Image (cartoon, rainbow, N blue to C red):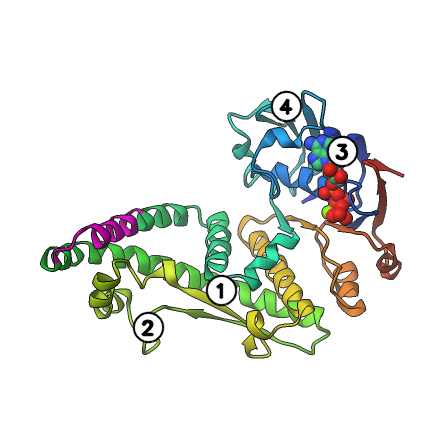
Amino acid sequence: MKINRIELKNYRNIESLELVPCEGVNVIYGENAQGKTNILESIFLFTGLKSFRSSKDSELVAFGKDHTKLNISFSTKTREQSAEIKITDRRRAVLNGVSLPSPTALMSKFPAALFSPGFMSLIQNGPSERRKFIDSAICQITPKYAVVLTEYNKLLKQRNSVLKDNDNYRETKLFLECINEAFSILGEEIYIERKKYLDSILPYVTDIYAGLSSGKEEISFSYIRKGDRTGDMNLSDILKNHETADISSKMTLTGPHRDDIDININSVSARSFGSQGQKRSAAIALKLGEAELINNFIGERPVILLDDVMSELDASRQDYILNHIKDMQVFITCCEPGSILRMSGGKTFNINNGRLI
Ligand SMILES: Nc1ncnc2c1ncn2[C@@H]1O[C@H](COP(=O)(O)OP(=O)(O)OP(=O)(O)O)[C@@H](O)[C@H]1O
Ligand SMILES: [Mg+2]
């Protein structure tokens, strides 16, 4: 998939901007606070998702204006398409001239993979960030997974509220016996889907990471199943083993809501031992791997949006990003125009005060 043209009106600090990107790498550069991330953010909105920076749509409208209007034309494998997003106090979207019931209807029409500095929390923070990443990545390619997650979370809530509120040991034990079967079936399904996802994405991520590190480092993942002592226990047995602990701590201590993914570089944890550049490379490799997998599933290469990706990367890693991402349209923002000198091909855009110069 590729964007042929972008037009923005009254979007944050951008009064009016027209950008005709190339089908390869597009670098948007300029000083701080000029509007680089704003451009990437506006493109990202066409995925149908909310902004990765503002939860309120009204914040996207330029100060003092009553609406913003974004237009893109893009080509998919089958045809030329156009989309429009108009934001007043709420967001409306039009695809190929037809008004959509909700902007979320754009989902899967315009696939994009975004790396923003906030995504580093995937490597740096606790397990919930990694669970969130893998769950939303699976939802994109297996929509029924979202249903399983919702059902699981409903049962988890019930299980936890009985554990918390019921002080009668026998009653609680009886309740757990009733709920555990359904709970383990759903939990096992989540575990299997997550393992499957990691197995599918791994070859892409290892390739990309090897490219980024010029073959000097290797990335690997392992799925950490809380309470699995032997490495091959099923959730039902894990839950049984933790029953007394669950009752005394008044919460569900095992299950996919407590699992984690170890991201290792050269066999040691990236979170505990990785350098800044290694962590950033791992996060980028995961995002680019996700894009490859989306392409595999829906047959359309997502647009890649890389916000502020160059900082903390050495020359050879920057070179890989600028010159070795194949067959995908990429938008990169950076402050430092020096790195662009190493780019063979591609297009550059200099932005100042919301205007291309
Ligand atoms: N609704 C809005 N109306 C007008 N200006 C806004 C609005 N929202 C944000 N801005 C301004 O847009 C400017 C550019 O923001 P942006 O995040 O795109 O900068 P950037 O070029 O990516 O900078 P950096 O290199 O620091 O990441 C900021 O100065 C911000 O105050
Ligand atoms: Mg920025």
Pointer 1 local density, CA inside 10 Å: few below 14, some 14–19, many at least 20:
some
Q: Which residue is mark 2?
A: 228
Which is nearer the N-term, disc 3 or disc 2?
A: 3
CB under 8 Å between discs 3 and 2: no
Numbered-mark total:
4
Which contiguous range is marked in magenta?
154-168
Q: Give the vertical position of 265 relative to 154 (above or below).
A: below
Disc 2 and disc 1: Cα gap in Å?
18 Å
Q: Which residue is mark 3?
A: 13
Residue 97, numbered label? 4
**Quarter of the image with the N terminus in it:** top right
Asked if residue 277 is among those painted magenta in the image, a careful observer would answer: no
Which is nearer the N-term, disc 4 or disc 2?
A: 4
Q: Nearer the viewer, mark 4 or mark 3?
A: 3
Q: Nearer the viewer, mark 1 or mark 3?
A: 3
Residue 198, numbered label? 1
